[in-house]
Image (cartoon, rainbow, N blue to C red):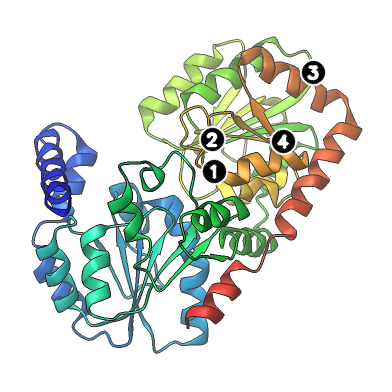
């Protein structure tokens, strides 16, 4: 099985190489791994007491981040090596100040894993959520390096729990400890005699901390002007079209803020096209001292980095990615005590189902469903307040994962 796995991972790399001839993201993936060994040796040659964190992409990084920052705060002498699988994580966080060296993970072959572990002397390793790499896991285990899978979630349909998945299931016995997010994951692993520790999700700790440090933005405060404000956060085209249709038909006096996940000129233009000329919309970059913000109905954020500070001005959030099982962070808006809407295709995100169960999260099926939900929230203040309180309590009662993992592993 290991032989077949290695062939498949090499084939995947080959396909990415072909696609990189015309696809920018694939090109970054390929270029980022070029001469990885020499770059790793050079970048880590002065690092000692190295703790290695590996994340697939940006979402997993946000789960590693609270633990990284706690380690650096408690033990400044520790060096942090941070690796990513995806360009969308690496490119955005390649300047992250709490990491001493940031790189791409080379493809998971036995030789690469051996060379990686020879290039840098790792004291401990942390893999986040779904990052189970067979060859790296086996070589780390051979070197008797403590390593952990943190903020992990498991579902019955995953390869580990299928009749043909015994080889993959055995990989879960290799980490020193597995820290899972929820009771369902722990119970599922227990059925297959894999031990785990119920720790929760480290993101709860970070979003609570961020909400307490939220920076006031006078432009947004003036724009919203105490009106019911819908914030489409990390929105994709699906969410943007739904919000645009609602805005064009809505009779209530409300405000809309779009903070799309893609801020390219072409994507921003698509939002304006969906709104049409009858809606008064303005880009954040177009605002001047003379702009009368109260006169505008829609504000489109055409930059990266503002979203976490925008939620404090929202009455309700509609978070992107929930129609394709790529849901963005719904904990950020929840911690500000506002209802959070998202598509119902969110199987990979246990917090989405939990929030629905407790009343603050709302799954959206289609346009009609979306409009009915919003109309209810706009006109029924008791409903709005009830869901807002539910979300604030949801986040506040789930803090502590970072401290638990830190105390168990450091």
Give the mark, 4 or 2, whose residue is nearer the N terminus. 4
Label 3 to label 4, Cα distance in Å? 15 Å
Residue 218 image point, x, y percent: 68, 48
Which residue is depicted at the point 20% across and 40% down? Answer: 26
What label sits on residue 316 in the rendered view? 4
Residue 323 horizontal side relative to residue 225, left or right = left
Label 1 to label 4, Cα distance in Å? 20 Å
Residue to which mark 3 is pinned: 252
Label 2 to label 1, Cα distance in Å? 6 Å
What label sits on residue 346 in the rendered view? 2
Residue to which mark 1 is pinned: 349
Residue 374 image point, x, y percent: 74, 23
Instruction: Give the answer, above or below, for where 252 lies relative to 21.
Output: above
Which residue is depicted at the point 64% across and 65% down? Answer: 209
Instruction: Give the answer, above or below, for where 227 lies relative to 303.
Output: above
Disc 4 residue crowd, few under 14, some 14–19, many 20+, Cα 10 Å: many
**Element type at marker 2?**
loop
Visible residue check, residue 23: yes
**Element type at marker 4?**
strand
Q: Quadrant of residue 22?
A: top left
Contact flag, marks 1 and 3 (Cβ < 8 Å): no
Give the mark, 1 or 3, whose residue is nearer the N terminus. 3
Give the mark, 3 or 4, whose residue is nearer the N terminus. 3
Label 2 to label 3, Cα distance in Å? 30 Å
- Depth check, front residue: 206 or 13: 13
Contact flag, marks 2 and 1 (Cβ < 8 Å): yes
Contact flag, marks 2 and 3 (Cβ < 8 Å): no
Closer to viewer: mark 3 or mark 4: 4
Instruction: Give the answer, above or below, for where 17 lies relative to 331.
Output: above
**Element type at marker 3?**
loop
Give the mark, 2 or 3, whose residue is nearer the N terminus. 3
Which residue is depicted at the point 67% across and 64% down? Answer: 399
């Amino acid at each position: 099985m290991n032989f077949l796995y290695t062939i498949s991972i090499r084939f995947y790399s080959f396909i990415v190489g072909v696609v990189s001839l015309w696809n920018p993201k694939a090109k970054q993936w390929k270029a980022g791994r070029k001469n990885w060994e020499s770059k790793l040796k050079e970048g880590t040659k002065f690092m000692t007491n190295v703790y290695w964190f590996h994340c697939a992409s940006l979402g997993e990084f946000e789960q590693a981040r609270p633990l990284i920052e706690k380690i650096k705060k408690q033990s400044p002498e520790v060096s942090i090596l941070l690796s990513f699988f995806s360009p969308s994580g690496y490119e955005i966080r390649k300047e992250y100040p709490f990491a001493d060296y940031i790189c791409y993970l080379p493809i998971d072959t036995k030789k690469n894993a051996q060379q990686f572990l020879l290039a840098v002397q790792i004291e401990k390793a942390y893999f986040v959520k779904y990052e189970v790499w067979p060859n790296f896991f086996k070589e780390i285990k051979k070197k008797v390096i403590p390593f952990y899978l943190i903020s992990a979630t498991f579902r019955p349909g995953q390869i580990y729990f299928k009749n043909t998945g015994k080889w993959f299931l055995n990989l879960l016995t290799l980490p020193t400890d597995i820290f899972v997010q929820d009771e369902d994951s722990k119970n599922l692993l227990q059925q297959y005699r894999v031990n785990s520790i119920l720790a929760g999700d480290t993101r709860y700790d970070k979003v609570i901390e961020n909400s307490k440090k939220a920076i006031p933005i006078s432009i947004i405060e003036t724009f919203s002007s105490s009106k019911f404000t819908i914030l489409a956060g990390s929105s994709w085209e699906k969410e943007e079209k739904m919000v645009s249709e609602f805005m064009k038909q809505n009779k209530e006096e409300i405000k809309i803020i779009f903070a799309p996940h893609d801020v390219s000129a072409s994507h921003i233009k698509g939002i304006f096209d969906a709104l049409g000329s009858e809606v008064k919309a303005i880009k954040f970059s177009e605002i001047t001292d003379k702009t009368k913000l109260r006169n505008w109905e829609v504000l489109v954020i055409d930059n990266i980095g503002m979203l976490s500070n925008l939620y404090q001005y929202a009455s309700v959030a509609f978070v992107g990615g929930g129609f394709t099982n790529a849901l963005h962070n719904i904990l950020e808006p929840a911690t500000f005590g506002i209802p959070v809407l998202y598509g119902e295709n969110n199987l990979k995100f246990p917090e989405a189902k939990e929030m629905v169960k407790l009343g603050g999260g709302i799954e959206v099926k289609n346009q009609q469903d979306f409009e009915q939900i919003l109309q209810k929230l706009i006109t029924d203040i008791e409903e709005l307040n009830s869901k807002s309180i539910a979300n604030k309590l949801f986040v506040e009662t789930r803090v502590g994962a970072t401290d638990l993992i830190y105390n168990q592993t450091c």
